[in-house]
Amino acid sequence: MKKFDLTKELRTELIQHTMERLENYYENTSQYYVLAKLDFNEIVSKVKEVDFDNPIHPTKAIDKVIEGLEKYTLHSPHPKCFGLFVPRPVFPDIIADRKIPK
């Protein structure tokens, strides 16, 4: 079994990369459909791309997760999303939910 023990440099890179991707999403949410157009076979195909025996670089893994969320989820921050039970998150909420490394 492989260890998931990252160096300080890699952790810093991952945090910065993730924050850049999240900031891009937050700034460009209006470019997405409010509700995803789901294609079951396409989603299954994406999941099958994951190969735990041949892991990819962690930033690429984060990109895959974020791209999946961008394409296959409800975008509650979208300006045209008026969901009564899905309030739009605000940036301070996103920061508050993030765990800050010591």
Image: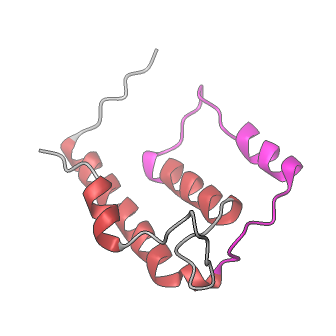
Q: Quadrant of the C terminus?
A: top left
Q: Residue at point 60% right, 69% down?
A: 75
Residue sitting farthest toward the top: 1
Q: Is residue 49 magenta?
A: yes
The x and y percentages for residue 35 are 72, 69
Q: Per the image, is 10 magenta?
A: no
Residue segment shown in magenta: 32-59
Measuring from the top left, give residue 19's x and y in whole percent: 35, 65
Q: Quadrant of residue 76?
A: bottom right
Locate residue 70, reporting x and y percent. 61, 65
Q: Foreground residue, 16 or 22?
A: 22
Percent across and percent down for residue 53 are 60, 25
State the residue in front, 81 or 43. 81
Where residue 54 sits, quadrant-wise, is top right
- Residue sitting at x 62%, y 78%: 81
The majority secondary structure of the magenta stretch comes to loop
Residue placed farthest to the left in the image?
102
Q: Residue at x 20, y 50 (%)?
A: 100
Residue 56 sits above or below residue 20 on the image: above
* Residue 44 placement, left or right of 12: right
Lateral position of residue 76 relative to residue 42, left or right: left
| Position above or below: 10 against 89 | above
What residue is shown at x 66% (from left), y 78% (from top)? 32
